Image: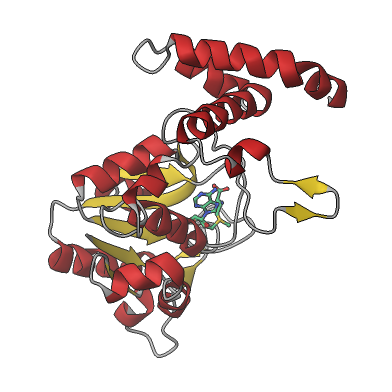
């Protein structure tokens, strides 16, 4: 898959993307990450990339011409029909399903990382297909938001994670939060690993993990639990029973904590 970024800080992108899962995916060419820097498309001696907003007020905007030229250059390389996404706090809030869809189609992307107070509205109207937000807060540059998208999509590309199953078990993939995980040692201070996980009984382990995932979702994300409960293709008697067991065992303690 090819992802092309429009950014004033390509070094930040390449450096951040050189670690871990992302770094490996790039080395193995499962992901091709390119950057176009508007600064390379400036024509003045100061290589200016910001400009004052019409109407006055605080802050600057990204200068239109270099940004426009960088996007056009990226489209020329990536293809004129490649989806152009502007990372913006005003965009559609990202969720796992949106990213699963991107990875499943493996369609290439051009991501625009804004800086300053953002970009000229006419660029959005004429060149941007979608606006995506990483959450209801404001960060100072779209690079971090773009990296979130790049990372989250890349780990869903088949073959990128050592075991494709591991992404499937993650929170949100099946409408539930993930179950708790434990590793060695068996005991730290007075805390032990739940016995069932040491039992070797795969059926019991699967049941315990599903029960924990259901219970966690119930206590932490009731909105998600409602959604999965109302989806007949995802909800069944086993889940209903395990959730009831969880609530009987831990419900009172959790309610007391609140
Ligand atoms: C300081 S922000 C500009 C915020 C803008 N004035 C607003 O309030 O909508 C600069 C850049 O960071 C990026 N950014 C900030 N918050 C974001 C978020 N929650 N999701 C995605 N991108 C974000 C955008 O690319 C934006 O152009």
Q: Quadrant of residue 105?
A: top left
Q: Please determine whether, in this image, residue 233 is positioned above or below residue 111.
A: above
> Left or right: 234 with respect to 179?
left
| Near-viewer residue (217 or 97) | 217
Number of residue marks: 0
> Left or right: 81 with respect to 209?
left
Q: Please determine whether, in this image, residue 80 is positioned above or below residue 32.
A: above
Query: Looking at the rendering, in which quadrant would you find the C terminus?
Result: top right
| Near-viewer residue (41 or 108) | 108
At a point 51% along the width and 27% down the height, the residue shown is 207
At a point 35% along the width and 58% down the height, the residue shown is 161
Q: Where is residue 222 in the image (x, y as percent from the top left)?
A: 61, 20
Q: Position of residue 92 (x, y in %)?
A: 43, 37
Q: Where is residue 52 in the image (x, y as percent from the top left)?
A: 52, 64
> Left or right: 202 with respect to 55?
left
At a point 66% along the width and 38% down the height, the residue shown is 195
| Near-viewer residue (143 or 148) | 148
At a point 39% along the width and 66% down the height, the residue shown is 22
Q: Residue furthest bottom?
A: 45
Q: Please determine whether, in this image, residue 3 is positioned above or below residue 257.
A: below
> Left or right: 48 with respect to 196?
left
Tell me if I can see residue 129 in this picture.
no
Q: Please determine whether, in this image, residue 203 is positioned above or below residue 102.
A: above
């Amino acid at each position: 898959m090819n992802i092309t970024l429009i950014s004033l800080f390509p070094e930040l992108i390449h450096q951040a993307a050189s670690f871990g899962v992302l770094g490996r995916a790039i080395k193995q060419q499962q992901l091709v990450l390119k950057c176009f820097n508007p600064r390379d498309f400036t024509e003045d001696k100061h290589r200016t990339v910001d400009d004052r907003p019409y109407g006055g007020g605080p802050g600057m905007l990204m200068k239109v011409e270099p940004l426009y030229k960088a996007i056009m250059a990226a489209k020329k390389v990536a293809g004129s029909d490649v989806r152009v996404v502007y990372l913006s706090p005003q965009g559609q809030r990202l969720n796992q399903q949106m990213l699963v869809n991107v990875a499943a189609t493996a369609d290439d992307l051009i991501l625009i990382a804004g800086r300053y107070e953002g970009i000229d509205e006419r660029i959005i109207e004429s060149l941007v297909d979608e606006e995506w937000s990483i959450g209801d807060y404001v960060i100072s540059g779209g690079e971090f938001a773009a990296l979130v998208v790049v990372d989250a999509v890349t780990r869903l590309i088949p073959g990128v994670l050592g075991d494709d199953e591991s992404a499937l078990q993650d929170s949100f993939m099946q409408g539930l939060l993930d179950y708790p995980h434990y590793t060695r040692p068996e005991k730290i201070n007075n805390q032990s690993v739940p016995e069932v996980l040491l039992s070797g009984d795969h059926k019991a382990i699967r049941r315990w993990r599903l029960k924990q995932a259901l219970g966690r979702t119930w206590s932490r994300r009731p909105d998600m639990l409602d959604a999965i409960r109302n989806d007949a293709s995802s909800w069944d008697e086993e889940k209903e029973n395990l959730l009831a067991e969880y609530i009987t065992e831990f419900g009172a303690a959790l309610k007391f904590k609140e």
